[in-house]
Every structure is written in C-alpha cells, then in structure tokens.
Amino acid sequence: MSVEGMNGSPGSTGSVSSHDAVLVGAGFSGLYMMYRLREELGLDVRGFEAAGGVGGTWYWNRYPGARTDSPYSAYCFSWSEEIAQEWSWSERYPGQQEVLRYLEFVADRYDLRRSFTFDTRVTSARHDEDTNLWTVDTDTGETVTATYLITGVGLLSAPNLPPIRGLDTFQGELVHTARWPAAGVDFAAKRVGLVGTGSTGIQILPSIAERASSVSVFQRTPNYVVPTQNRPLTDAEKADLRARYQDIAKQIRQHPFAMPFTPTGQNALDVDEATRQAVYEEGWRQGGFHFLFETFDDLSVNEDANETACEFIRGKIRAAVRDPEVAELLTPRGYPYGAKRPPAGTGYYETFNRDNVTLIDVSDDAIEEITPTGLRTGTRRFDLDVIIFATGFDASTGAFTRIDIRGRGGRALADKWRDGPVTNLGFSTAGFPNLFMITGPLSPFANIPTCIEETVDWIFDAISYLRENGLTSFEAAERGEQEWTGHVTAIANMITAGKGEAVNTWFAGANIEGKPRAINVYFGGANAYFDTCRAVAAKAYEGFVLS
C-alpha cells in the first residue's frame, strides 16, 4: 500500500538564514504574493513548497477527470497584462494538466521558482516576542527566521484519509485523489473501489469506468450533480478574453461568488411552473454554476425556492439512470442544493448504466475495515485490486493545524481554534503577530483565484503600510475577530448553503472525525467581503492591532 506524498521527505541541511518574509505554498497564492513582495516591495522572501514544483492544488490533484468548476474567464489571474495576452485557454473548464501548465508559465514568466525551496514541508513556526521574529522549521532540518510569516496553503489542501481499520493491510494499490501518483494508476482489468461521491468522485468515476473491469462506488450521501457542458473554446472566445480581461475581472468582483455572471432579477417562486421549468432547462443546458447563479436569485436564501431546483435535478437523475432503484439511491433528499459544494460532472449519472459499475449505499451499512484483499462493510465483503479515496479534505483549518504554529506565550494555533476557527476577515488571528493568511479561515467560499488576488493585494498593502509608518507588528484585535467570526456564523445561519449542521459537509467541519462543528467559510458574498476589506484598510486597519 502507498499513499504518495501524504508525509514530507526527511532530511537535514542544518542551515539557518534570516529573511523579511517566509511564504508557505507555491500555488496561485504563493506565486502572486511572491511576485508582489519581491518585485514591487523589494523584500527578501523565502518560499517553501512541499511539492516538487509550483501548482499547489493542481500539482497534487492529478487524478483523471480533474478540472476547474469555474469557467476559464474566472479561473485565472487578472493582475498581469503579459499573462492575459500571452496565455490562451483551450477549454471552457480547463483540466488539471492545463491549469498546472498555466501556473508553471506564470512562474517562469516572472522567474518565481528561484525564490522557492521545493520538496520541503514547513513543520513548525514559533513567534519570538523579544525579537518579533518568526522561527520556521522544515522537514529537511532547515531553520529560518523572518519578520512576516505568510501562508498560501489553500482552503482544500490537507487530505482527509478516514481512520478506517486495516488501511495498512491492503495488498493492492490504495491512493487518495489529492495525492495522485505522478505516474498515474493502471486500471486495466482491475477491480476498483471508489470511496466518496463528492466533487472529486463525481469527476473521476466516468474515466475509471471506461478502463476498469469493475467499479464499486461506495456512497454515503448522494449529491446534486449538474453537467459541466464542457467544450473547446472558439478563437473568438479566446480573443474576447484577451481584449476584455480587465472588464471581466471587474464584473467578477461584483458577484457574490466571484463569477462572471449577472443576477437575473427573478425569483423562482414569482413565476409560473412552465416558466420556471424553462429557466431551469436553459440553466441545465448552460451547465456548471450557471444553473445555480443564472436561473433564480432566491435559490441561496429561500428554502422553498431551492426545493424547486432540487426537484428539477431529481427529475434529471430519474431520466438519466435506467435502473429505478439505482436512480433512487443517487437522488439527494433532506438538504438544499448548495448546502454541499455544488458539483459539476460529465456523464456522471449515465455512468451508472454501465454493466461494470455498481453503486453501494453505505449510509446505513458503513465501511468498517480495509482487508488485505479489499474492504468490508457491516454486512458485505468486496474483493478489490485498487481502492481510491475521494474523501476530500480537512478544509480551511487543516493545513494550518498540521503545522505546529505557536504565537504569543507559546500558544498553539490548533489550541486556539479547538472549538472552530477565529479570525478577522480571514487574514489574521489575535495572539499571532505578523502571521498573514491568504484566503484563510472565514474568508469567502467563492471563485478562488479572484479571492486570492484580492487578499494578496490587501496583505501587500498592509505590509507596505507597516513599513511606511515605522510599525513592526500586525495582528487581529480580539474584539475585531470576535465580531467577524460572529458575523460569519450569523450569515451562514441565514442562507441555504450555510446550514452545515444539518448535513455532513466540510463547510462545518462535519467530514472530519472529532472536528468541531463550526462554519469555516464566509457566505456573505465575495463582493461584500471585498468592499469590507477595502473599508477596513481605509480606516487604518480598524479591527486590527498595529504597533
């Protein structure tokens, strides 16, 4: 058994160096932050990345079928004229390999790789009150110090491998989708078990089914899956993005989920049934997030309206899946569309019509053990050659708590967040001076590259402000973080997407055994969040302590 990359590689250099800033991560966040601090502020920045190259999420998630669920015009940088004019996407929803090539292109275009040390995982960071420096240790034995510690570790980057008995006994190949082997996995003539039917499982299943001798899909909770409707881009679409990328970026920043969509101005419950069905059919034809964001404006705030969308999707499932019993197992009930991350797929439901694909309901017959030859539920045994865990992530906080981060008085960040994350705007948490988090806990759940750009710019401006005003320390005020954390929770309780207590969703930490139930992302709208961040900065960073 092997789960590639779940742990760092040991080693020791014994070296010590001092820098202005240490930056953790070389994905979208790390690349842009490195560029701004190094090229525009002239800081000495040392970057560390656990992977063997740039890319972040798109380096690790190499599983078949992996692609963005945001359209090409949104899932990209908008800060660089050179990037916008020199890069051209090929698909409406770019795949993993293309997104990785894009980030490698950005890194090479601005010579960013030289500032990162790869294959190196940060294991601990501790703040020294006397020197006002962070001391950072890595798994290679290197220790560095810096004034600022900046994390670009990602919302979904700490893989969740469920604590099932017998994981180490399996004699076949066991992989997690977020640590997919670079050489790939051979499914030919193999009996494959797929555990998990969230966004990743939905993407990977059709590809596996085409190659494996059999696929057993272990599902706990069915999902609302809208088709991606992916296709190649036309030359006209590519030219339009190059010509209008700044206007598109402005439009995206005005949308609650940072998407290139415009509110429709109509509500599901204000139209007749025929009109409602026609609107949903057009949303289905457009695919992806169009169905959620360009049909009716009240789907995220009105549960009765949301139920009309749910029932439409249920009808599509019944039409796509030939076996009525399988269709019923695949049909979500009891929670709103959007309460889980809204997934998009290609041929997902139709895949269950294949003779070599079997759906196993583990909601009442849970997986109890991995055996040397497969796995066992409470009542059945399955012989398998490959087991794939598409079981998601310890979201939002997991990438932080897996590093031993200690602030004032030696207090561990994991201890502070024991009952759930507490931050001000997702940037900073009290007691941890000069720790800046790019899209940290309690920042928006929205199109991530846009959120990254906005938060990197905010952190850049904050550090610039410190240096211009002779200030050396920045952290969230306790009152500021309490007010923001309370606001995030209140907003979540108002809308359908935030009702995490009622369903098993990572939005509330429910997918991790022992993790406290606490909303870890902001559902109040990326556009409102961006406005709030700008207003806070304009008031000399009200809600933060600068000294």
Image (tube, rainbow, N blue to C red):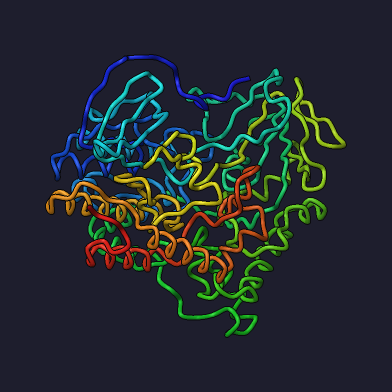
> Above or below — where is 509 with respect to 215?
below
Does the image show residue 523? Answer: no
What residue do we see at 77% from left, 30% from top?
369
Asked whether 495 or 305 is in front, the reply is 495
What residue do we see at 67% from left, 49% from top?
350
Asked whether 275 or 109 is in front, the reply is 109
> Above or below — where is 227 with respect to 82?
below
Quadrant assignment for the N terminus: top right
Q: Quadrant of residue 44?
A: top left
Image position of 43 (left or right of 276): left
Asked whether 129 or 305 is in front, the reply is 129
What residue do we see at 60% from left, 23% from top?
186
Image position of 353 (left or right of 61): right
Q: Where residue 93 sits: x, y (%)?
A: 44, 50
Q: Where residue 395 sits: x, y (%)?
A: 52, 46
Q: Where residue 160 sits: x, y (%)?
A: 58, 37
What residue do we see at 42% from left, 33% from top?
59
